[in-house]
């Protein structure tokens, strides 16, 4: 006779759950980090990032999730759905107001942002740029809108702040927009004179504290100053002593800006105000009169505005750069402070060099970011082997950004040739197609070439084992920056 032994299923289940609960309790953070790491990797794949960026972040969040996961949520974001939705709504209001005021221009402006009848002046160095921005602030009668990545607490920054405060006290509408990361140490106390005089200041995506629904990684790198909605200064120069000042400085970066007037200023002002409305939480309906205004033609220059960033579909500046390179017939000159191209741009330049086109890359011999200098060597060696001409400036830091194509067009603005500028930052570019403007920019570049020397004689051209290891490490880290 078989004797049945009573089975306590509740006890068995309890005996099984107790070690599982103990394991989960002891490893909760690790398991949570692993799950979040998988979600992060899935999100990056859906964002169509560069493979090097996905690999670097994946390695960090999987191997060191306690560090990597929080760091990703702080600085790892790229396209932000929340940001896209809010900024697009602001932009659509701005476009609707402008279109209602000028219905005959709607199709052209919406599709191309290309304008004729402009005038451009080249501000060849930091002294000319500083003199121009101070002069235009003092001459403004109705409004001053300035957006900059870095506002220094040094002499140039204080001078501009004091001039803005003085104009605000006179009743001029003053709006100053600074980036939350680039101007991290420019505190509200420094800006107080502007506010107390009646002006307004705002910080784009604050970093400390985290007062944002999106990643602190999304930086506004644009530099735009608009005066009375009639003139604008655009370029790569920040308002800080390394970039501009009233007197010569042997350590100042080599950079330039342009002073423009004409119909294109309306679009530059619209870009400023959409960024301002987002950062200051202001209603774009309050800017209807500004959105509706278009400056009269004042010259012969044709220009196109290209605004790129996490709030737009696609990567507009990158798209245009790829198109310009692939369609070039004779030569491409790229002057940039940093050179970390994505694979498509890198291969496009190599193909053109192999086909006998003149590809020329001009860089500072030593930039202000050693890690980026190490990471660029691989790309420069491969391009050099393909027949491209690589030139390094041994003196000052080059911070200017110029791309010249076949002497028929030029692209200038705030974007560097690196993956942060092309795929993450808010950037602004001007595409110039008037021959006189191309000559003006080519002369600025040519002045620098006299002091440059070939990459072939630099340490970076040598491919020693120790150098290769350092470069590979730098290439791994650069996509995280």
Image (cartoon, grey):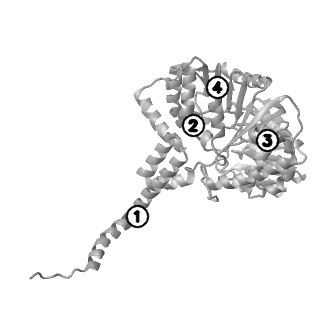
Reading the chain from its start, which is encountered first: label 3 or label 2? 3
Residue 369 tag number: 2
Which residue is under mark 4?
327
Q: Is residue 133 visible?
A: no
Residue 466 numbered tag:
none
The Cα–Cα distance between marks 2 and 4, rounded to whole angstroms, is: 32 Å
User: Distance between the Cα atoms at labels 2 and 1?
Assistant: 39 Å
- Which circle's residue, 2 or 4, is located before the other in the chain? 4
**Which x, y percent locates residue 327?**
64, 25
Of badges 2 and 4, nearer the viewer stands: 4
Q: CA distance from mark 4 to mark 1?
A: 54 Å
Residue 451 horizontal side relative to residue 16, left or right:
right
Q: Secondary structure at mark 4?
A: helix
Between disc 2 and disc 1, whose residue precedes? 1
Could you say where residue 20 lies in the image, as x and y percent from the top left?
32, 68
Mark 4 nearby-residue class (10 Å; few <14, some 14–19, many ≥20): few
The residue indicated by pointer 1 is 28
Label 1 crowd bin: few (<14), some (14–19), many (20+), radius 10 Å: few
Residue 157 lies left or right of residue 459; in this view the side is right
**What is the quadrant of the C terminus in the image?**
top right
| Contact? badges 3 and 4 (CB < 8 Å) | no
Q: Residue at 74% of width from left, 50% of height from top?
A: 91
């Amino acid at each position: 006779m078989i004797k049945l032994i009573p089975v306590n299923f509740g006890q068995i289940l309890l005996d099984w759950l107790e070690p599982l609960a103990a394991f989960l309790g002891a490893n909760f953070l690790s398991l949570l980090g692993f799950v979040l790491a998988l979600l992060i990797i899935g999100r990056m794949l859906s964002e169509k990032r560069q493979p090097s960026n996905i690999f670097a972040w994946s390695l960090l969040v999987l191997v060191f999730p306690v560090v990597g996961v929080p760091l990703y949520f702080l600085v790892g974001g790229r396209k932000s759905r929340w940001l896209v939705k809010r900024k697009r709504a602001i932009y659509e209001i701005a476009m609707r107001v402008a279109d209602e005021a000028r219905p005959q221009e709607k199709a052209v402006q919406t599709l191309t942002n290309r304008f004729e009848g402009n005038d451009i002046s080249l501000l060849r160095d930091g002294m000319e740029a500083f003199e121009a921005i101070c002069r235009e602030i003092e001459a403004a009668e109705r409004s001053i809108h300035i957006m900059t990545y870095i506002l220094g607490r040094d002499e140039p920054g204080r001078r501009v702040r004091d001039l803005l405060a003085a104009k605000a006290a006179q009743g001029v509408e003053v709006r100053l927009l600074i980036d939350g990361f680039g101007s991290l140490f420019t505190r509200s106390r420094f800006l107080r004179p502007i506010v107390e005089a009646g002006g307004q200041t705002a910080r784009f995506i604050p970093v400390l504290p985290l007062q944002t629904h999106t990643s602190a990684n999304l930086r506004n790198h644009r530099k735009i100053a608009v005066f009375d909605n009639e003139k604008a200064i655009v370029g790569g120069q920040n308002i800080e002593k390394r970039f501009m000042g009233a007197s010569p400085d042997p350590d100042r970066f080599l950079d330039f800006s342009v002073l423009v007037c004409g119909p294109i200023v309306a679009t530059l002002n619209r870009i400023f105000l959409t960024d301002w409305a987002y950062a200051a939480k202001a209603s774009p309906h309050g800017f209807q009169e500004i959105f509706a205004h278009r400056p009269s033609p004042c010259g012969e220059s044709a220009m196109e505005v290209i605004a790129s960033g996490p709030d737009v579909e696609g990567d507009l500046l990158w798209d245009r750069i790829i198109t310009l390179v692939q369609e070039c017939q004779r030569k491409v000159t790229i002057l940039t402070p940093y050179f970390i191209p994505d694979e498509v741009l890198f291969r496009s330049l190599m193909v053109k060099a192999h086909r006998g086109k003149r590809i020329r890359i001009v860089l500072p011999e030593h930039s202000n970011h050693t890690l980026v200098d190490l990471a660029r060597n691989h790309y420069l060696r491969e391009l050099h082997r393909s027949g491209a001409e690589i030139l390094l400036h041994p003196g000052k830091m080059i911070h200017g950004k110029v791309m010249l194509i076949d002497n028929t067009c030029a692209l200038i603005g705030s974007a560097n040739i690196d993956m942060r500028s092309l795929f993450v930052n808010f950037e602004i570019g001007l595409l110039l197609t008037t021959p006189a403007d191309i000559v003006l920019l080519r002369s600025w570049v040519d002045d620098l070439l006299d002091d440059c020397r070939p990459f072939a004689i630099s340490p970076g051209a040598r491919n020693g084992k120790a150098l290769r290891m350092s470069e590979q490490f730098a290439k791994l880290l650069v996509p995280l920056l």
